[in-house]
Amino acid sequence: MFTASTILFLHAETSVHVGSGESHGAVDLAIQREQHTGFPVAPASGVKGAVRSWFADQNGATDRHTAAFGPDTSNAGDHAGAIAFTDARLLLFPVQSMTGVFAWTTCPSVLRRLQRDLDAVGHTAASWDVPSPDEDEAIGTEANVNHTSQSEVLLEERHFAFKSSEAANNVALWLNGNAIPGSEAYDYWSSSTGERLLILHDDAFRDLVQHATEVQARVKLNEQGTTGEDGNLFYQENLPSDALLYAQLLAQDDLSGALGDGGGAEALLRYIRTLDGNRLQIGGDASVGRGLTRVHFLGSDEEDTE
């Protein structure tokens, strides 16, 4: 039984390709999406695998590593790992904007699900109200840089009427203080949260995450050229850089028995939290720099100031 938990946030520093989604239209290699919402998602198995690989590279196959992630495949029946992850869900989706270069978009259903997930890990400081925009409306803070002097927002080719609200400001303040890394390198991004946050209607957000992702043409080469056997043109979909995802991290007591009193759920959770501030490679195409994400744990900045 899981007795300790937290949230880890993944800020995409390069575009991310978590593939094997259903191909559609001209896209040959689509990203994975939730079946019921159509929102992009990174499966839990991939997140756990990336975290496990990072710790293996740093520390090798120690008893603590085995207790956290489970034994290798040849001994998989010995015991389960004490650490589990949920799918990494989309929280903020960057979209090209006519003013302000880009906006960080989200929607009420995403924010309410975040509140539910935060409640599940015992975080009670996210009691802010969730704005409810109309279908042609974008709600942001008074500091928003994405609207024109006529209070209009143009995201990709969609027009929205802009409205500022205190509720959006409260959401932006929480994201800035909890979801964005607090390092000096992220000062610009944390200060941009209130300036770029736009809360859209659920349907408008769904349309953008389905049609405003990055689609890149790629060519597989062979010795003779780009055509014929083993050579072809294909189109690949990626989640754009600067997207923000999050997943729950769950821990139970060590099941291997190797750690003794040091194998409690809280101790193993602290072990995983040493990943904070480092970078993970999520998804495919690591050799061309895809999938680099910055890790930030809920509450990390508070711990740093204690």
Image: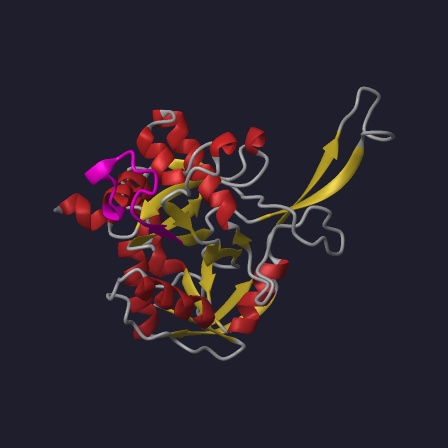
Residue at 34% in and 26% down: 59
Q: Horizontal placement of 269 versus 15: left or right?
A: left
The N terminus - image quarter: bottom left
Q: Horizontal placement of 33 versus 61: left or right?
A: right
State the image coordinates of residue 61 (x, y, percent, origin top left). 38, 26
| Furthest-left residue in this view | 306
Tell me if residue 72 is in the magenta stretch. no
State the image coordinates of residue 165 (x, y, percent, origin top left). 34, 75
**Which quarter of the figure has residue 207?**
bottom right
Can the viewer see residue 148 in this picture? no
Residue at 37% in and 32% down: 55
Name the colour scheme: secondary structure
Residue at 28% in and 42% down: 268
Q: Nearer the viewer, residue 145 or 224?
A: 224
**Which quarter of the figure has residue 116?**
bottom left
Residue at 19% in and 40% down: 261
What residue span does the magenta drawing correspond to?
248-266
Q: Nearer the viewer, residue 302 or 72?
A: 72
Q: Horizontal placement of 253 versus 14: left or right?
A: left
Q: Nearer the viewer, residue 274 or 191?
A: 274
State the image coordinates of residue 69 (x, y, percent, origin top left). 40, 39
Can the viewer see residue 248 in this picture? yes
